[in-house]
Image (cartoon, rainbow, N blue to C red):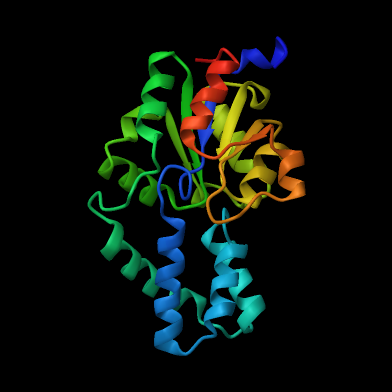
């Protein structure tokens, strides 16, 4: 890294697939719904993959494009929420390896942190509290706080403003294509830690680095003398 890039002051995290190992659980819940109502499971799974990193509203558009304008997305979303929270609430959602130690190290180094998740803010807050992580983040931005979903840059711009840093002064930790596109468009320094979506040539170009785990993120930040 050059001297200019050593001036990073913050790290902004996506949540699903980055902090929590939750994206596969969402797909599994959708597949249960597909089985119950007779929807094409491969079509449902593809909609889920196409929706990674987006808001509920955007996900609805994706499902309706695949299954037709009369697809009862709002009703099925309620089913999804019920099934998902039965399995995830109360601290049952598994954390990604290394998240707690990374956040603790960032906090001890005086590096600002935030969450920028397309999930509703109330859900993000609750899941972070259940996991004992909420106090390690300076602020939480949820997808319901903005009109435009990732890949638009809005959520990351809002997160940077909330913690008082310029986008160019902050890393963004993302696992999805839409998230990397959003952080890049905001002028941040995206680091991709792949979960369900494997890195493509586009992601290699947009991300400052593609790293295999949060432990590697910590190593990367230390090498850049941020930690």
Q: Residue furthest left?
A: 90
Q: Residue at x 55, y 67 (%)?
A: 48
Count every numbered label the image shows and give the total.
Answer: 0
Q: Would you place residue 205 above or below residue 79 in this image?
A: above
Give the camera-side residue of 208 and 143: 208
Q: Residue furthest bottom?
A: 38
Give the camera-side residue of 155 and 21: 21
Q: Which picture quadrant has residue 100?
A: top left
Q: Residue at x 39, y 34 (%)?
A: 98
Q: Is residue 141 left or right of residue 62?
A: left
Residue 212 position in % (x across, y down): 55, 40
Q: Would you place residue 216 above or below residue 199 in this image?
A: above
Residue 158 position in % (x across, y down): 58, 35
Q: Would you place residue 157 above or below residue 74 in this image?
A: above
Q: Which picture quadrant has residue 157?
A: top right
Q: Residue furthest top?
A: 3
Q: Which picture quadrant has residue 31?
A: bottom left
Q: Residue at x 36, y 23 (%)?
A: 104
Residue 206 position in % (x across, y down): 74, 39
Q: Is residue 202 left or right of residue 211?
A: right
Residue 68 position in % (x across, y down): 63, 84
Q: Is residue 179 left or right of residue 39?
A: right
Figure quadrant of the N terminus: top right
Q: Would you place residue 87 above or below residue 96 in this image?
A: below
Give the camera-side residue of 62 and 145: 62
Give the camera-side residue of 32 and 152: 32
Q: Residue at x 56, y 63 (%)?
A: 57
């Amino acid at each position: 890294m050059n001297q200019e890039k050593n001036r990073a002051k913050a790290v902004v995290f996506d949540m699903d697939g980055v902090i929590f190992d939750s994206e596969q659980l969402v797909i599994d819940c959708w597949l249960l719904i597909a089985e119950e109502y007779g929807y094409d499971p491969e079509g449902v799974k593809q909609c889920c993959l196409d929706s990674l990193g987006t808001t509920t509203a955007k996900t609805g558009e994706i499902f309706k494009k695949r299954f037709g304008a009369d697809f009862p997305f709002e009703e099925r979303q309620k089913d999804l929420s019920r099934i998902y929270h039965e399995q995830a609430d109360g601290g049952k959602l598994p954390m990604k390896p290394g998240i707690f130690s990374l956040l603790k190290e960032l906090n001890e180094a005086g590096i600002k942190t935030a969450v920028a998740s397309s999930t509703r803010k109330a859900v993000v807050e609750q899941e972070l509290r259940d996991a004992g992580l909420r106090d390690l983040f300076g602020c939480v931005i949820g997808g319901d706080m903005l009109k435009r979903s990732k890949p638009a840059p809005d959520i990351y711009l809002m997160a940077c403003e909330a913690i008082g840093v310029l986008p160019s002064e902050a890393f963004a930790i993302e696992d999805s294509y839409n998230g990397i596109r959003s952080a890049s468009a905001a002028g941040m320094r995206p680091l991709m830690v792949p979960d369900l979506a494997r890195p493509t040539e586009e992601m290699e170009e947009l991300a400052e680095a593609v790293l295999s785990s949060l432990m590697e993120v910590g190593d990367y930040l230390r090498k850049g003398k941020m930690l």
